[in-house]
Amino acid sequence: MKKRIFIAAAVLINSTLQAQDSTKILDEVVITANKFPNKTAHTGKVLTVITRHQLEKSVGKDLSQVLTEQAGLYINGANSNPGKDKSVFLLGARADHTLIMMDGVPLYDPSGIGSNFDIRLIPIDNIERVEILEGSQSTLYGSDAIAGVINIITRKPEKRPLGVSVMLSYGSYNTFHGNTGFSGTRGKLSYRLDLSTYSTDGINEAADTITRPHMTGRNGYTQNSVYAELGFNPSAVLYMQPYLHYTKHHASLDQGAFTDDLDYSASTTNIQAGFRSEFHAGKTILHFVYNYNDIRREYLDDSAKVRVLTDNYSRSVYSGKEHFADLYGVFPLGQFLTLTGGSDFRSSFSDQEYHSISVYGPYDSKLGRDSLHHSQLGLYGAMVLDTKAGFHTELGGRINHHSVYGNNAVYNFNPSFLFRKKWKSFVNFSTGFKTPSLYQLYSDYGNPKLRPETAMTVEGGIQYFSADNSFSGRVTYFNRVVKDIIVFYTDPGTYRSFYINQDKQADHGIEAEASLHLDPSTFLKLFYTGLDGKVTTRINGKDTVYFNLIRQPKSSFGMSLGIQLTPTFYTRIDLSAVGKRTDISYDAYFNPLQINLKAYMLCNFYAEYAVLKNKLKCF
């Protein structure tokens, strides 16, 4: 197989481009851990932050590629075609056990089998920072946060009346990426508008150059997005912000391994529209968030150049709509205590249809929102103790009511101790849950008697901060057990297939990382992740145990080295070493076959040159 090197030439123009100081590791303020701004030194949760400065030094990569360079995270398909689906695996958990959020709003796909959100729908251009919070976080954020949450925080408007940024790039396989951003503040109003486009011819994911070389085609991909936000400060105590996020992408697909198809495609359209507000009553802060999520996925194979001769035509459409509202307050209780409490509501609907024509005749299936709908109401609270002596802890709980299965509850307890502002020890005990999806409840294979998947996670570790606050090192151990995992089951007597609660999954591992910042643009970062896990399932009336980490490496290592050689010239090298992985395929009789995937190493090199006082950069 011929190897190719991806080469990109690009230019970035920004009238307000500035470097951010990333050396203050101990005093860095984060939001996701406690749902209010708090310093990393004052939380016992395991948190990783990707800053705006780091994103600016990663131009040319998409969100999945940046995420997979972090400790504990592996994105299957991150370095494949941009249109390839991206499965998010956090610390050995399943892909649907990591909650994706945007500005604190949970994102789901009501039309999907696992309801997990597609990160391809989030362009990297409009991201200010990313906060990755490990461990079960269902107390504050509800369903799906079993392994953790990834909170995408969007860029804020510039303080000046008009800020403009332009980014253009072109690379191998006719790949083009462009972004234009406008933002500013004038009086009580602020605004931000980002327009992004991306297109590539891609590579052929199922190349068959031997038997049918004339039928080989590349898997192209296009994406267009619009992000618009408007902020309004009618008074010193009230802030309101309506927003609209629109993304559409289109990808060419194959019929399967080594089976190319030149007219099979998938397109997805997503609209996120909502409103957030913040009201200050003394030291108390009240927040209200409403988000409307509309997603539509369509798969079309019109078979003009079919590779599978038994199929003539197929079209499937999956659409989902969701309303989410969250009302919560942050209440300081004296000098050392802070209470966060509130209620959130989530209502989901889906419409699904499938139509095909083949040698076996036509087939139709249609499900509407009359049956595909459910709702959830959650009441939650968390008390944070923050003492001057260095002891910090959070104790929280949530009661969740589901319209189908009823009630379930979760809790978390996260004590930590900061000694001499250098050593931080922490222990986290947390439980999490994942509700059944609409497809698992009500599809042709649905089971309305499903219970939620539940998890218990224990984390512990120690972190060191240097005296000048430029070096940080952390070692963490975790152990997670998930029960009542929902699996696809076929009754051996009736041959009827449906979903049931059956498996138990146990994962554990160690995570070590260190970072050294000599100045905002010169740094060294290292990490290692070691994982192991098993699944216990019931086959023919007996418990069977097998290895769990499908498509995930047991060990991975990463290194990033960035150097500001001159005031105008910057270079960076990223090295990733990914260990062996195991995957599952099926033979002609649908018997599972284990496939061993080789270990690999990936090296990325980045360089940029800035002129016009850092307002124009070429990379």
Image (cartoon, helix red, strand yellow):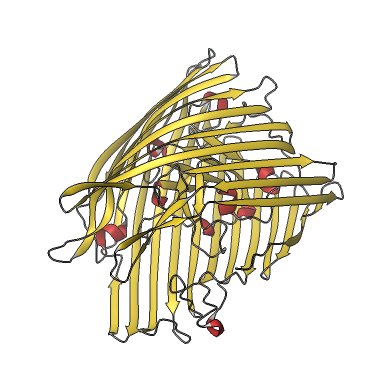
Q: Is residue 382 visible?
A: yes
Image quadrant occupied by the N terminus: bottom right
Residue 496, relative to residue 162: is it above or below?
Answer: below
Q: Which residue is drawn at 67% across and 19% down?
A: 467
Image quadrant occupied by the C terminus: bottom right
> Which quarter of the figure has residue 203?
bottom right
From the viewer's side, name the closer residue of 142 and 370: 142
Could you say where residue 302 lies in the image, as x and y percent from the top left?
44, 83
Could you say where residue 609 lies in the image, as x and y percent from the top left?
82, 50
Q: Which residue is drawn at 68% across and 34% down?
A: 22
Could you say where residue 613 lies in the image, as x and y percent from the top left?
86, 46
Is 335 situated left or right of 167 in this image?
Answer: left
Q: Outermost residue toward the top?
A: 389
> Which quarter of the figure has residue 51?
top right
Is 517 situated left or right of 306 in this image?
Answer: right
Is 313 situated left or right of 11 in this image?
Answer: left
Is 369 situated left or right of 99 in this image?
Answer: left
